[in-house]
Image (tube, rainbow, N blue to C red):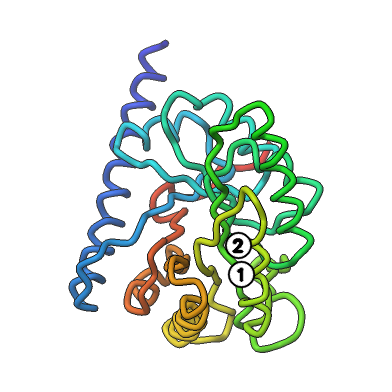
């Protein structure tokens, strides 16, 4: 390693240390403001960032990482298998990728249809043929809070999936009835043009209805870099934070 590359590595360690500390300070302040004492799980969204950054984050105590491209996270999970990391799949998932995701994922935050539930169940079953100790895959039901039929359009124009609030309990029953899957709770992204706090309170209400039938499904995955305070105030148990920890996304190449 050259002197220049060592200096660059040291600067990146310093940058990520400062950024992670700043995010944790924001979470602490939000907890204090809301009167909560239970700290939500921080999931650092590392999509497009190199494994070198993830190694730094692991050294800083980060255990949970979010990704949304199967090919990318599959390679990262294999390379970093010895670090004890938990991988959360947070993007829209095609059923034909479910088998691959079942190899490495701790949780999937984007379960929004019956066909995907069945595909994930089949994927875990195949994994257990060679790894019987493979834990159940935690499933978050992604809820569309847009109030309109179809997907919610994201900032970049991509379509975000999501089940309607009326479909949530039926999906919960299907997940619980599928061997190898475990119902964790619900997940949502605050729709564009909506007040995040109101959206996350709506999600908390949907979570309460789900828990009435499935008391163990207590997880609420909500909040990103721009709206984590609103998510904490509404009771989120998992926060998905990317740019505030890692900075500007590197150019694709």
Q: Mark 2 — residue?
A: 176
Q: Name the quadrant of the N terminus.
A: top left
Where the C terminus falls, by quadrant? top right
Q: Label 1, on which residue?
A: 172
Q: Is residue 42 left or right of residue 49?
A: left
Q: Quadrant of residue 99?
A: top right
Residue 131 in the image: above or below residue 107: above
Residue 146, image x and y in percent? 63, 84
Looking at the rendered structure, which numbered label has been put on residue 24?
Answer: none
Instruction: Indicate the secondary structure of the residue bearing disc 1.
Output: helix
Give the class, few, some or many, for how many residues have Cα within 10 Å of label 1's Cα (few <14, many ≥20).
Answer: many
Q: Say above or below: 203 vs 116.
A: below
Residue for point 18% across, 72% down: 32
Q: Mark 1 and 2 residues: CB-CB less than 8 Å, in contact?
A: yes
Instruction: Please state the horizontal and vertical placement of residue 124, each as a whole percent of the image.
Output: 66, 42
Task: Specify the quadrant of the image occupied by residue 141.
Answer: bottom right
Q: Is residue 105 above or below residue 9?
A: below
- Compare residues 107 and 57 and report the one nearer the observer: 107
Q: Residue at x 26, y 71 (%)?
A: 30
Q: Residue 83 appears in which quarter of the rendering?
A: top left
Q: Which residue occupies 50% across, 27% down?
A: 80
x, y percent for residue 163? 68, 75
Q: Secondary structure at mark 2?
A: helix
Give the residue drawn at x 47%, y 80%.
212
Q: Is residue 72 left or right of residue 184?
A: right
Q: Position of residue 214 (x, y in %)?
A: 50, 71
Circle 2 Cα neighbour tier, 10 Å, few/some/many (<14 / 14–19 / ≥20): some
Q: Name the foreground residue: 108 vs 10.
A: 108
């Amino acid at each position: 390693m050259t002197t220049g590359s060592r200096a660059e590595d040291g600067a990146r360690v310093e940058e990520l240390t400062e950024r992670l500390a700043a995010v944790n300070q924001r979470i602490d302040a939000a907890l204090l403001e809301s009167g909560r004492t239970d700290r939500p799980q921080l999931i650092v969204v590392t999509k497009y960032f190199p494994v070198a950054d993830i190694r730094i984050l692991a050294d800083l105590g980060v255990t949970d990482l979010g990704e949304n491209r199967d090919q990318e996270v599959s390679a990262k999970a294999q390379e970093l298998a010895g670090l004890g990391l938990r991988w959360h799949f947070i993007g829209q998932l095609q059923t034909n990728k479910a088998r691959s995701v079942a190899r490495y994922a701790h949780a999937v935050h984007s379960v929004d249809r019956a066909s995907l539930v069945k595909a994930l169940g089949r994927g875990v079953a195949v994994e257990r043929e060679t790894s019987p100790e493979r834990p159940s895959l935690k499933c978050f039901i992604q809820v569309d809070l847009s109030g309109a039929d179809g997907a919610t359009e994201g900032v970049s124009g991509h379509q975000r999936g999501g089940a309607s609030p009326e479909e949530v309990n039926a999906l919960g029953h299907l997940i619980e009835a599928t061997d190898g899957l475990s119902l964790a709770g619900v997940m949502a992204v605050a729709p564009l043009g909506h007040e995040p706090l109101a959206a996350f309170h709506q999600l908390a209400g949907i979570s309460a209805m789900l828990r009435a039938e499935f008391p163990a499904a207590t997880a609420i995955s909500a909040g990103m870099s721009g709206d984590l305070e609103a998510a904490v105030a509404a009771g989120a148990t998992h926060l998905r934070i990317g740019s505030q920890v890692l900075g500007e996304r590197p150019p694709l190449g």
